[in-house]
């Protein structure tokens, strides 16, 4: 059927695919980012040209058999081509090839000239023939003041219908702009071209991934010929469609190239619509197959989520039916990323598709390193082919009205049921809060605030098996903005009989960090409620502000083992906070105290912060098991071991990657923890991978073995006609059902940023996993959901996998120094140059008399050489660590075991009102024989 074959054969000079391939048969391997390529005719019969990380490259027969990417033919006039298309033959026998350029320096699409007779008849792109189309960095089209839009997709189609002269147009999509643009007269000199904005993607936040396609419909007896444009959207809406694109009037630009700066046409532009028949939320790659007359037959699209295998789909616009072409590689091929003896039997990240116009062979570009954001390894991808049969690639499933075809879902253990409607961007998930009547789920909502969920009572049907926000049991809205994770403190508030504190991360752009509420479990007839007027900002001026806090976790001020309680070990509670914008994890040491005397330590850093990518924090809820803090990061999931001992010797702790999916390739969005010793020997972690609006996957992770499995991928909506099928947006509000999630259907999880495990005993619901998500994210529409599923044990017998724990540098010693800083006027800097003699972490803190604007900065070398000290100057470029905020205590650190021995400088900069002398600290490593300088340090140069 539609199995993918990994072999290529030369048949009369034409690239073809063997119908069956032996396991040792050659295939095109070792390519980098194989995007949407193009078949180009040549004297020797034609070749496939790959749009890859190496440029536009010809695929040739290899000397030892099989085929290879001929790097000698690679053309880089488009620096990062992600889709290529070819026009008709020119009068001189050459062809124009149009390439999207998604490089950081992109000036828009590039047109190059291809000679089919070059290179001994194999064909080649003419050097120096590249022309940037439409005008370099045309403001408002290819770029704006914030930078270039990164042209990701191109397709040839008809010109603006108002142009009387027959012409050809190029349609464009961009990664960093929602615009869909058209360049008329694209095969003419640039001065004769005109550029127009004709539409936007359906997602107002995101642009186009890798692929658009023009679908040409021939004229019929009753209708003229038309062209539709299909669009791979980036934001999670899937594939969208613009119909009859020639008649899309521009909202910007004009069809006439002589018109300069035309006014914006408010009535212009066509509206795109999502194609419901193509079942993907993460499309990558697109190819349209045409017949010999240029009429389109069907559309190939790859469903390529970041958290499971990819599937190649084929869509028939005439019937609205979809085929599943392939999701398996037969026979498996060597896994270039993991190395021998690992084999790859499924696609990982399909990035590009193309069709041989002669025989219908389908080309599939795949690269498992696509999700590696920083320095991905090269030459790990493949180009696979499925040979056409009678001009069409066979399929694993042929869709029909009676038997629709959908991509196979990832394997899962559980299908959660709906717990509540009506949530808006619940970034921190839900929290169980005890009360006199047994307890309730509370959640901090982007729209409604911190609210209690109660069981819904229908006036006609009575009590339903459904919950909703009780608007009468929310915070008053005077303090909390957009809420993140909520944590319940088990310590009774001093001076009260049974009150407790609830801590809520504040996630908006003006976030002060964490809000503390007092909670009365006996209020509201025993349902529990917040004490009016009790909200306070925690640890003001201690550096918690400005981080868009979203994750909180209670811990202990001393090490505790799994299953132990802090109070049982004679310890006191501490509160850990992680935010979206800052790569550091902070600890509030005395959360129950008066906020004015609370102290804060920087204790750990995320993986990206450790790698030097500043400002990359965590994404959703986090959790504590024993003395270990579990985090959702941009590259996956991590743990900080023994966090109560951090920082150790003034050195912040690093995170350790967990064996959940493939670290570095996934987007960790939420963590929930099960700390019940009856459920596991060392604890269970639930982790959501949720790349934007694409479908999320929840994993179950066993701490004892460092292994994981897919736990849930979709939820079950209530049965149509039941009371629970009514959408209760609150306990007193209803609204029509969402057409995208009809009653009785299975629903995907999108923007899943909160997980919680019920901490009670099993007979009360303990171990139940709660997941919160909202496909509309920050839009205040209350369209999100809460889901729940009962506890499921992790299977026994898993082979343990070792954690990659970082070891300290041997033979070194930590130097902890006090720095006495003189009084500083506004705009003044005090700097200290110092020398380290061992590779390691460098940390510094600074406490000032009042909370105000200041900066603590670390540099390699000394940008202040020759200047006085103090000196009236600000910060310099090239810092390796910086904290720039309004606070009373500042803290910076580099990554553990990374900074080489050498000369560094720390800067204490007062950017506000003058203050008296202050004190800072400095910590770094020296080798064993070299003694640390005396503390406190004197002078501003330490050797």
Image: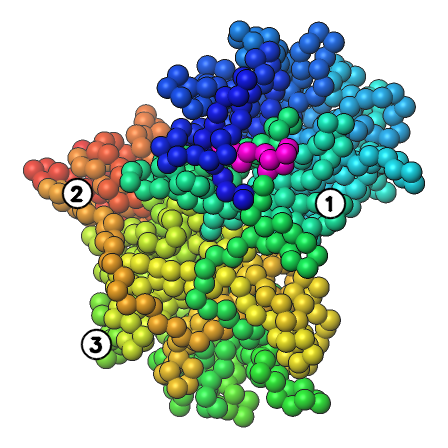
Local packing at callout 2 (Cα closer than 10 Å; few below 14, some 14-19, many 20+) is some
Magenta span contains residue 392: yes
> Viewed as shown, does residue 620 lie left or right of 782?
left
Quadrant hosting residue 105: top right
Secondary structure of the residue carrying numbered label 1: loop
Quadrant hosting residue 927: top left
Quadrant hosting residue 209: top right
- Nearest the eye: 269 or 909: 269
Residue 373: % across, % down: 44, 39
Residue 843: % across, % down: 28, 46
Local packing at callout 3 (Cα closer than 10 Å; few below 14, some 14-19, many 20+) is few
Specify the label residue 317 is tagged with: 1
Magenta span dominant secondary structure: loop
The disc, 3 or 1, on the residue closer to the chain's N-terminal end is 1
Q: CA distance from mark 2 to mark 1?
A: 62 Å
Specify the label residue 569 is tagged with: 3
Tell me what residue is drawn at x 21 percent, y 77 percent: 570
Residue 597, placed above or below residue 549: below
Residue 672, placed above or below residue 877: below
Looking at the rendered image, the disc whose residue lies closer to the viewer, 2 or 1, is: 1
Q: Which residues are magenta?
A: 383-393
Specify the label residue 809 is tagged with: 2
Q: How many marks?
A: 3
Tell me what residue is drawn at x 26 percent, y 39 percent: 898
Q: Residue furthest left?
A: 929
Tell me what residue is drawn at x 53 percent, y 36 percent: 386
- Nearest the eye: 31 or 262: 31
Q: CA distance from mark 3 to mark 1?
A: 66 Å
The disc, 2 or 1, on the residue closer to the chain's N-terminal end is 1
């Amino acid at each position: 059927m539609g199995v993918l074959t990994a072999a290529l054969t030369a048949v009369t000079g034409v690239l073809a695919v063997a119908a069956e391939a032996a396991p040792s048969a050659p295939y095109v391997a070792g390519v980098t980012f194989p995007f949407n390529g193009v078949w180009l005719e040549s004297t020797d019969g034609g070749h496939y040209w790959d749009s890859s990380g190496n440029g536009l490259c010809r695929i040739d027969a290899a000397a030892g058999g099989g085929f290879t990417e001929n790097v000698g033919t690679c053309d880089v006039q488009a620096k990062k081509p992600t889709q290529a298309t070819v026009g008709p033959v020119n009068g001189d026998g050459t062809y124009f090839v149009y390439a999207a350029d998604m490089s950081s320096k992109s000036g828009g699409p590039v047109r190059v000239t291809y000679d089919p007779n070059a290179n001994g008849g194999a064909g080649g792109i003419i050097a120096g023939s590249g022309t940037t189309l439409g005008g370099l960095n045309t403001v408002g089209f290819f770029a704006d003041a914030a930078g270039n839009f990164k042209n990701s997709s191109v397709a040839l189609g008809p010109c603006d219908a108002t142009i009387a002269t027959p012409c050809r147009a190029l349609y464009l999509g961009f990664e960093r702009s929602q615009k869909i643009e058209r360049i008329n007269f694209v095969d003419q000199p640039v001065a004769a071209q005109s550029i127009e904005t004709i539409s936007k993607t359906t997602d107002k936040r995101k642009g186009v991934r890798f692929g658009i396609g023009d679908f040409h419909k021939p004229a019929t007896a009753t209708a003229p010929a038309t062209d539709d444009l299909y669009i791979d959207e980036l934001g999670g809406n899937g594939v969208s469609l613009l119909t009859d694109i020639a008649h899309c009037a521009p909202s910007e630009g004009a069809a006439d190239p002589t018109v300069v700066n035309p006014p914006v046409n408010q009535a212009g532009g066509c509206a795109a619509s999502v194609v419901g028949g193509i079942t993907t939320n993460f499309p990558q790659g697109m190819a349209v197959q045409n017949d010999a007359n240029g009429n389109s037959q069907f559309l190939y699209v790859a469903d390529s989520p970041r958290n499971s295998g990819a599937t190649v789909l084929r869509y028939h616009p005439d019937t609205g039916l979809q085929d599943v072409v392939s999701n398996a590689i037969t026979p498996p091929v060597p896994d270039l990323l993991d190395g021998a003896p690992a084999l790859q039997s499924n696609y990982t990240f399909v990035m590009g598709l193309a069709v041989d116009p002669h025989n219908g062979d389908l080309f599939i570009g795949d690269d498992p390193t696509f999700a590696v954001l920083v320095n991905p390894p090269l030459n790990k991808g493949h180009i696979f082919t499925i040979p056409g049969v009678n001009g069409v690639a066979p399929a694993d499933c042929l869709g029909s009205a009676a038997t629709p075809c959908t991509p196979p879902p990832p394997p899962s253990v559980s299908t959660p049921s709906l717990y509540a409607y009506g949530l808006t961007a619940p970034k921190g998930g839900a929290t169980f809060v005890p009360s006199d009547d047994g307890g309730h789920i509370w959640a901090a909502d982007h729209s409604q605030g911190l609210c209690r969920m109660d069981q819904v009572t229908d006036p006609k049907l009575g009590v339903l098996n459904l919950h909703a926000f009780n608007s009468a049991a929310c915070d008053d809205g005077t303090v909390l903005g957009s809420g993140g994770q909520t944590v319940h403190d088990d310590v009774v508030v001093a001076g009260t009989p049974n009150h407790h504190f609830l801590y809520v991360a504040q996630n908006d752009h003006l976030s002060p960090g964490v809000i503390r509420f007092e909670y009365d479990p006996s209020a509201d007839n025993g349902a529990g409620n917040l004490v009016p007027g009790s909200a306070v900002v925690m640890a003001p001026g201690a550096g918690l502000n400005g981080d868009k806090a979203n994750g909180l976790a209670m811990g202990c001020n001393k090490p505790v083992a799994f299953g132990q309680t802090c109070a049982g070990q004679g310890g006191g509670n501490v509160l850990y906070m992680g935010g979206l914008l800052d790569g550091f994890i902070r600890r509030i040491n005395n959360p129950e105290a008066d906020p004015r005397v609370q102290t804060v330590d920087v204790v750990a850093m995320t993986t990206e912060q450790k790698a030097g990518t500043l400002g990359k924090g965590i994404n959703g809820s986090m959790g504590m098991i024993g003395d270990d803090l579990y985090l959702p990061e941009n590259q996956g999931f991590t743990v900080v071991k023994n966090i109560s001992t951090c920082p150790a010797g003034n050195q912040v702790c690093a995170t350790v990657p967990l064996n959940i999916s493939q670290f570095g390739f996934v987007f960790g969005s939420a963590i929930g923890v099960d700390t019940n010793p009856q459920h596991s020997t060392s604890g269970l972690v639930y982790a959501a991978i949720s790349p934007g609006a694409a479908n999320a996957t929840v994993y179950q992770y066993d701490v004892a073995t460092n292994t994981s499995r897919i736990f849930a991928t979709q939820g079950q909506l209530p049965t149509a006609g039941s009371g629970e099928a009514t959408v209760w947006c609150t306990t007193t509000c209803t609204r029509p059902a969402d057409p995208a999630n009809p009653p009785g259907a299975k629903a995907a999880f999108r923007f899943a940023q909160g997980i919680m495990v019920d901490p009670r005993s099993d007979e009360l619901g303990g171990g139940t996993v709660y997941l919160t998500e909202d496909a509309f994210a920050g839009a205040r529409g209350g369209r999100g959901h809460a889901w729940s599923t009962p506890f499921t044990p992790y299977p026994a017998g898993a082979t343990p996998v070792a954690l990659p724990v970082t070891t300290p540098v041997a033979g070194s010693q930590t130097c902890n120094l006090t720095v006495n800083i003189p009084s500083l006027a506004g705009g003044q800097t005090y700097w200290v140059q110092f020398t380290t003699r061992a590779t390691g972490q460098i940390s510094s803190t600074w406490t000032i008399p009042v909370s105000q604007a200041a900066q603590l900065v670390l540099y390699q070398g000394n940008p202040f050489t020759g200047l006085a000290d103090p000196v009236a100057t600000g910060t310099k470029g090239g810092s390796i660590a910086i904290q720039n905020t309004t606070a009373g205590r500042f803290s910076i650190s580099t990554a553990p075991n990374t900074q080489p021995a050498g000369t560094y400088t720390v800067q204490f900069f007062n950017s506000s009102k003058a203050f008296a002398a202050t004190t800072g600290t400095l910590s770094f490593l020296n080798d064993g024989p070299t003694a640390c300088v005396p503390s406190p340090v004197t002078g501003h140069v330490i050797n």
